[in-house]
Image (cartoon, grey):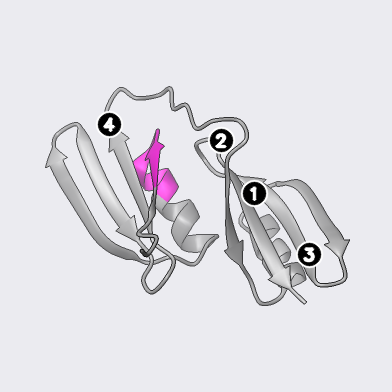
Amino acid sequence: MKFCWTTIRVKNMEESLKFYQEICGLSVTSHITLNPDTQIAFLGDGETKLEIISNAGSEQVDLGKDISIGFEVKVLDEHMALVKEKGIAVHSGPFQPNPYVRFFYVIDPNGLKVQFVENL
């Protein structure tokens, strides 16, 4: 069995696409308008895939308070600088719980915690 993707319901499609493209480095592989109120976009290729869905009038999105998604980066400090340059605050971190890993969190436009990890 292979993991397919993570689905996130979003408040604002354009804001979410910008975040996941610019901050997480994912490219849009398809963007479908099902009807005037519903859009679905798939981002990423290879192993990392994300599906985001927006429904008009869905300003309230319940993502669960203890859920986060994580992305591996090559150099944590460089990615943290990029995040700050784009005007996104670091939510927490950086942390280094052991000599082999460092990470920090940001909050996406929908309130979801996103982790960036450097394996040392």
Q: For residue 23, what is the image quadrant? A: bottom right
Q: Are marks 2 and 1 in contact (CB under 8 Å)?
A: no
Which label's residue is closer to the chain start, 3 or 4?
A: 4
User: What is the secondary structure assignment of the residue under circle 3?
Assistant: strand
Left/right of residue 88 with respect to residue 27 in the rendered view: right
Q: Which residue is mark 2?
A: 111
User: What is the secondary structure assignment of the residue under circle 2?
Assistant: loop
Question: Alpha carbon of mark 4 to alpha carbon of mark 2: how far?
Answer: 17 Å
Q: Mark 1 is on which residue type?
A: Ile
Q: Are marks 3 and 4 in contact (CB under 8 Å)?
A: no
Which label's residue is closer to the chain start, 1 or 3?
A: 1
Q: Is residue 85 magenta?
A: no
Which label's residue is closer to the chain start, 2 or 3?
A: 3
Specify the segment rendered in magenta: 7-16
Question: Alpha carbon of mark 2 to alpha carbon of mark 1: how far?
Answer: 12 Å
Q: Mark 2 is on which residue type?
A: Gly
- The residue under the point 35% across, 59% down is 4
Q: Which residue is mark 4?
A: 55
Q: Nearer the viewer, residue 6 or 34?
A: 6
Q: Mark 3 is on which residue type?
A: Arg
Q: Mark 4 is on which residue type?
A: Asn
Q: Quadrant of the C terminus?
A: bottom right
